[in-house]
Image (cartoon, grey):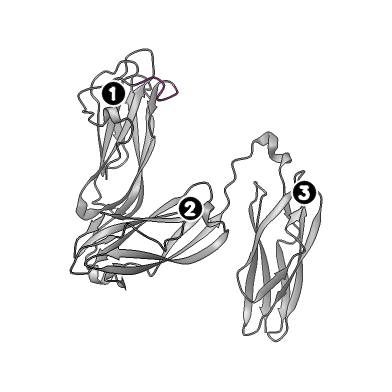
Amino acid sequence: MKRTTFLVAVCGFLFSCSVDVNSQDVVGSGLVWENSLLNIGAVLAEDGPATADFYFVNKTDSSAYIRSVETDCGCTVAAYSQDTLASDRVGLVRVRYDPQSRGGTFSKLIIVHSNVHPEGDSLFLEGVNVPYPKDPEKHYGVRKAGLGFVFPVINLGTLLTDAPKTKYVDFYNFNDFPIQLSQKQERLPEHTAVEMIPPVVAANSRAVLAISYDAAMKKDLGFVEETVPLSLLSGERMDLSIALMATIHEHFDPVPVNEVDNVPRLSIGEREIDLGKISSVSRVSGKVTLENTGPLPLNVRKIVSNCDCLEFAVPGYDLDPGEEMVLVFNFDPKGRRGIDHKTLTFFSNDPLNPTQTVVIKSRID
């Protein structure tokens, strides 16, 4: 699980040497890092420590050298280039992460002090630490095609449309034979990609599914759930279905301060609606006023209710500057009692508030 991708010419880099690098390969001044953040994915405890390589180039006009490297945890140890690097030479900081600590996602800070930057350059190592369970039979209690998973549904969390997100899911192969993913995944949706780490999983051993989800290609917003079919190979082909869920939000680049007044703006007149005391045998109607208070056209991408009992009708999804429209909703409280909260969520191209929610409250007799 090493990350060494900077230059083919330095793949054989040793701590005791340095190599030339074309000055056009990087931009900037000082010590220029290939990556200041590396994600090493899932680290299984039984695989031992994982390493990550941070490469840098000396883009000063004089020699540079590393004085010291600090880490914020005893679980991370850094080794680094000890020699003095001339201008345009490459150096390396190699970080070793020991997963023998509590599990879960981690983000480790590494500070590199050099004669170029005495206060230090900050690097970050991220990933997911997966401890070995005391009882795999119980821990991986959800069985599918002879594989054990912790949860029946994989929650990808919040996804943005600017870049795919990868979720690392550990599992246990309870089969008495090795398994691997088929090279042909004909039924896999275009917006998902799955990798098995390692590619071949031995019998009675653990591994990881790296599930990548491209929210932009999904072309949807809000809460989504779907089942992803996978094909496995052993002695014969096997089918495995993975249930996914996520919440998708559209990504907008930050709006400069001087442009805040030059974007579409969705203004919602009623952010909280109290229907008061209502009967469980009568439908109740209400309305929500939507207005574009910005100077550019507004597009409401999607409107979602959190219950089939809450229906709505809207005259359109586009608003010119200064235009408003009224959304009418109907709430059917049948079968419900007590204090009740329902929501309408609006997704729009308002870059300052792309997702807004209206809460509809009632007390049902």
Quadrant (top left/top right/bottom left/bottom right) for the C terminus = bottom right
Prevailing secondary structure of the magenta residues: loop
Magenta region includes residue 24: yes
Q: CA distance from mark 3 to mark 2?
A: 32 Å
Q: CA distance from mark 1 to mark 3?
A: 56 Å
Residue 148 is situated, as x and y percent measured from the top left of the image, at 29, 68
Q: Which of marks 2 and 3 precedes in the sequence?
A: 2
- For mark 3, what is the residue? 293
Q: Spot the residue most to the top.
A: 62
Q: Is residue 293 above or below residue 155?
A: above
Secondary element type, mark 3: loop
Foreground of the two, 282 or 324 = 324
The residue segment tinted magenta is 22-28
Mark number displayed over residue 300: none
Residue 36 is situated, as x and y percent measured from the top left of the image, at 39, 35
Quadrant (top left/top right/bottom left/bottom right) for the N terminus = top left
Q: Is residue 52 above or below residue 22?
A: below
Residue at coordinates 66% horizontally, 36% vertically from top-left? 257
Q: Is residue 18 above or below residue 217?
A: above
Q: Nearer the viewer, mark 2 or mark 1?
A: 2
- For mark 1, what is the residue? 67
